[in-house]
Image: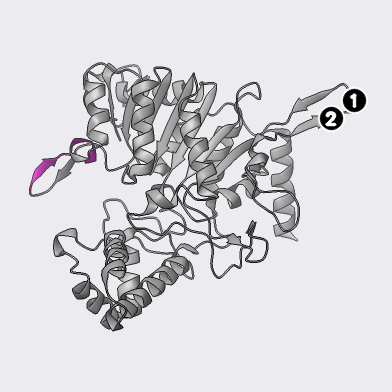
Amino acid sequence: MQVLTYRNGGAWREVKDPQEDGNGRAIPDPALAEINRNLSDCFRCTNLVVLTGLGTSLHVNVLPKAPGASGPRAAQPGKRIAPTMADLWNACKANREELFEKVIALTHFPAAKGENIEALLSHCKIAEEFLGDGDDKALVTGFIATAEQTVRDCVRFLDVEDEVGLHADFLRRLVRRSTRKLRTKVFTTNYDLCFEYAARKGRYVIVDGFSHTTPQVFDSLYFSYDIVKRESSPESHDFIPNVFHLYKLHGSVDWTKNTKSGEIEKNPASESPLLIYPRNTKYELSFEQPYLEMMSAFQTALRQPDTGLLVLGFGFNDNHLAEPILSAINSNLHLKVVVCDPGLGPWEHKEKGVQDGNDAKHPYLSKLRYLIEHGDARLALISATFEQSVPLMPDIAAETDLEQHYERIRLMREAG
């Protein structure tokens, strides 16, 4: 792990292996202490905002690697894993390879863009607009439909019984903040149900804009509701702990649109879930319902005083999200930002030596690095995976009595 902050002199510092002094006492590592300090500062803010991307799901159902091993991720037997953009490209190609090659030729997709399914679908949408009403247009239109179906199938990788313990641990650290602070807001670009299943595991309450009726119907009004506990006295009520808000910026595999009422409902078995598919029109689509409400809430949250923004597994490749973040950094002097991603810091290549990370070449991340190097103490970049980051986050309390009780009940059911 490495960290870049102004307090580090605007340079990357690597977390070292634990060291001991001559008396057998652990020597504090400056880089690790800096990471802990920035994460704690973020969590202590009145308004905690979390933005997560694909990087927070890549560990689910993946076999642990042997020390020093590299290469593609391997799934546990009988399990499916979260697809990367490269995985989606390969899946679309394998589905109908002959059609795939024809579409690449027909849309003049440049080889320089590599195996980028988002870029390819963007070219297809442009070509669809300009091709005449003939076989070529029908071919491209058919490929778009096939590719979107492939994406839908790939992102439905999660089953209820799959292990999402790391997500549950992450949520536990988020929801234990004082109820006197604003509820933590988790924004995610992921379509999957990792946070929903993790909340179920930890008995956390999600406020996600859907009603508590059947079927569950979306209405942004529900984001303004909260949950209190009322005892025997009608004058007594307290905000319950373990509640957070969840905003799915690009849709979800269990969202669907009722064709009769026009309302957005939850239906895990939907064959046509509401998703913003990977292509360059994501910005325009994000201003339709229900995405408009999610985007509005994201931009509003970043403008609040005493706000901490924690970014995990998000590569800043979606301009419609990166721009509001950069704008809030420029205008909100009370905003603290911590970005965690394994590709940020410099890395060593066996043949090429030390290589720059994404922070040096990415148009948005390089701006954050510039601000840090020139004295902005509000910002921190941490080169770490989701698995590495979660254990370093503040853990306010040990297991509560209720959590211990639920764990005993779970073990009893498994034993029976």
Picture coordinates of residue 380, whole percent (x, y): 33, 26
Rendered image quadrant of residue 95: bottom left
| In the rendered image, the vertical position of residue 358 relative to residue 95, given as above or below | above
Q: Are marks 2 and 1 in contact (CB under 8 Å)?
A: yes
Residue 230, disc = 2
Please report the bounds of the magenta region as a residue range: 351-360
Picture coordinates of residue 314, whole percent (x, y): 37, 43
Residue at disc 1, secondary structure: loop
Q: Residue at x 50, y 23 (%)?
A: 304
Residue at disc 2, secondary structure: strand
Rendered image quadrant of residue 343: top left
| In the rendered image, the vertical position of residue 64 relative to residue 109, given as above or below | above
| In the rendered image, the vertical position of residue 264 relative to residue 149, given as above or below | above
Nearer to us in this view, 368 or 175: 368
Label 1: how many Cα within 10 Å (few below 14, some 14–19, many 20+): few
Nearer to us in this view, 146 or 283: 283
| In the rendered image, the vertical position of residue 354 relative to residue 251, given as above or below | above
Label 1 sits on residue: 234
Q: Is residue 357 magenta?
A: yes
Any part of residue 54 in sight: no
* Identity, as a three-letter code, of the amino acid under mark 2: Arg
Any part of residue 381 in sight: yes
Q: Residue at x 28, y 63 (%)?
A: 126
* Identity, as a three-letter code, of the amino acid under mark 1: Pro
Q: What's the distance in space between the residues labelled 2 and 1, CA to CA?
A: 7 Å
Nearer to us in this view, 396 or 366: 366
Q: Residue at x 26, y 38 (%)?
A: 344
Count of numbered tags: 2
* Left-right relation of 378 to 197: left
Picture coordinates of residue 351, whole percent (x, y): 8, 49
Q: Quadrant of the N terminus?
A: top left
